[in-house]
Amino acid sequence: MLKNFSQQFRISNIYIFLFLIVLSSIVLRLHEINNLPKGLFGDEAADGLDAISILEGNRPIFLTENNGREPLHAYLISIAINVLGRTPAAIRWPSAIASILTVVGVFLASKSLTNIKSSLIAAIICSFTIWPIMLGKLATRPALLPLLLCIFIWLLSLAYKTSKNLYWSLSGLVIGVAMYSYTPIRLIILIPILISPVIFTNKPLRTQILPGFIYLFVSFILISTPLIHYTISNPSEILGRTTGVSIIATDSTIKESLNLLLNQTTTVLNMFITPNGGDWNLRHNIPKRPIFDPLMSLAFLLGLIITNLKFSINKRLFLLAWIILSLSATILSEEPPHFGRSSALISIIFVFPATGLIWIYTTIKKHSNKFIAILIPSTIMLGSIFYTIRDFYFDRYLDQPDTGFWFDEQCTIAASEINTFLGNGWTKNTNPPYNPNNITKPDKAVFISSNVCPQYSSSGYYTLQFLVPFDINQSNIVQRYTPDIIKETNTLPNQLLFLSIPGEETTIGPWLENNYTVSIIDGPWTPPDMLENSWLVYRSIYANRTGSIQ
């Protein structure tokens, strides 16, 4: 009885500790979610537009806009929009929640591969690593994939250990759902092919796995059949984004392809610990920061060695196949290393530094006292946590002008200005939820220059489309204009707002002054570039009909 009580107490402590880890991840990921990042990136807004379409009754199997995307993220956003309206917060909540739950997922997946201590440490590292934090801040599809894959690994481990058909079926269900999450899943599902030689040449393993794998396969097919059918019917739409970012050229020689592949692989492998080797995209990462800081890099390298020496051959092959396929998505595409396209790796990568830290603890404990054995790995972890909090939060990375620019801050400001003028929708100054079905139509009109947040050169086009609660393409309240097709002033409402490119005010201002009182205000500027040059994005021209009541 005392033994059972001790065991239950130990289990309770484990889950209390895990709860505290998750709590820390909640604070990190939900911190100022309404305001930071300052802008709403166009790709995020594109998912928001699809979510609105879902709320209107559409049920897409695949999203064809914005180069084609899997729909699961948009369905989740539609739930948030139904509660919070057309706001940046509604776009970000699903990714933030997925990033928080991924910490739990990493614990479960790591526990399947190692032990309780290692899995708790892996969860801590995941909680305080900038890569998964940024996935939760950038409200796009990559944030969903690590969570689903963690759950898949956990269920697959349970299925393998217990031989229960329920777990095999649930594994297939989860990986089937993952097919609707993010494109690199198409590579991850090739893992059975890579490890099949081991399964089929090992009779006990074959006998144990194959019957359950049938259940996995059947449940996977049942869930993914709609997408498979859509793919067969519309192959160009499904493959459009993949071929658009692929580095593979059909006219390249074998030597050229091999050299390119070697260069890409080297570039991608640098993302783990090499200074300035990480993703340079400001939406994915603090530019060029590697996945692991200098302190955690030591634990990661040790973990690679220890897992290779002490893990079973089956686990090593599984991890190797997972790493190869997870990295292939960024190795074979443009802009390597790409933290979004390699997000599948999050599900297993923290096993390695956690194993390294456990090895440091056990090795020191053999040759010294327990206090020193705990102190050194704890210092490494606390130092790594300090690096993250300092660089990401104390330095307010998401609040910096360059970061805002990469998140289409200028177009977000434009949307806020339009909504403030119209008295509808989200604004930067006040951010309450509102009912998107209760939009008033004021006696006002907004005209946006075709060169302000244009579709052909800026994804901020979608930012305006989502945040402004009127259809810019069809509404008479908000519409695009070119200077040569502006209407007669006597047909326009009493209050007008023009967002014009600098210089157009010299034409529009005098044209309005016969019937309106006109004021002109500079809009946002771009942050200085490397040559310290900055550009005015637009000028706001406010016009109030002479004699009308404001």
Image (cartoon, rainbow, N blue to C red):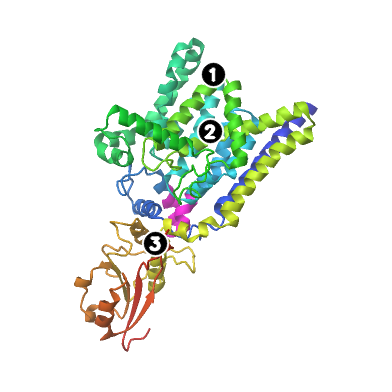
Q: At which x and y percent is residue 518?
A: 33, 82
Q: Which residue is drawn at 61% across and 53% down?
A: 390
Total labels: the figure holds: 3
Q: In this view, does 380 lie above or below 501?
A: above
| Label of residue 348 in the image | 2
Q: Is residue 470 above or below residue 269?
A: below
**Res. 229 in view:** yes
Task: Give neighbour class at mark 2: few <14, some 14-19, many 20+ (Cα, 10 Å).
Answer: many
The secondary structure type at the circle numbered 1 is: helix
**Residue under numbered circle 1:** 313
| Label of residue 467 in the image | 3
Q: How far apart are marks 1 and 2 (CA)?
A: 16 Å
Q: What residue type is labelled 2?
A: Ile
- Choose mark 3 or mark 2, whichever is in front: 2
The secondary structure type at the circle numbered 2 is: helix
Q: How far apart are marks 3 and 2 (CA)?
A: 37 Å
Q: Residue at x 29, y 41 (%)?
A: 240
Check the picture and name the quadrant holding the N terminus: top right
Q: Give the range drawn in magenta.
A: 76-94
Q: Earlier in the sequence, mark 3 or mark 1?
A: 1
Q: At which x and y percent is residue 251?
A: 24, 33
Q: What residue type is labelled 1?
A: Ile
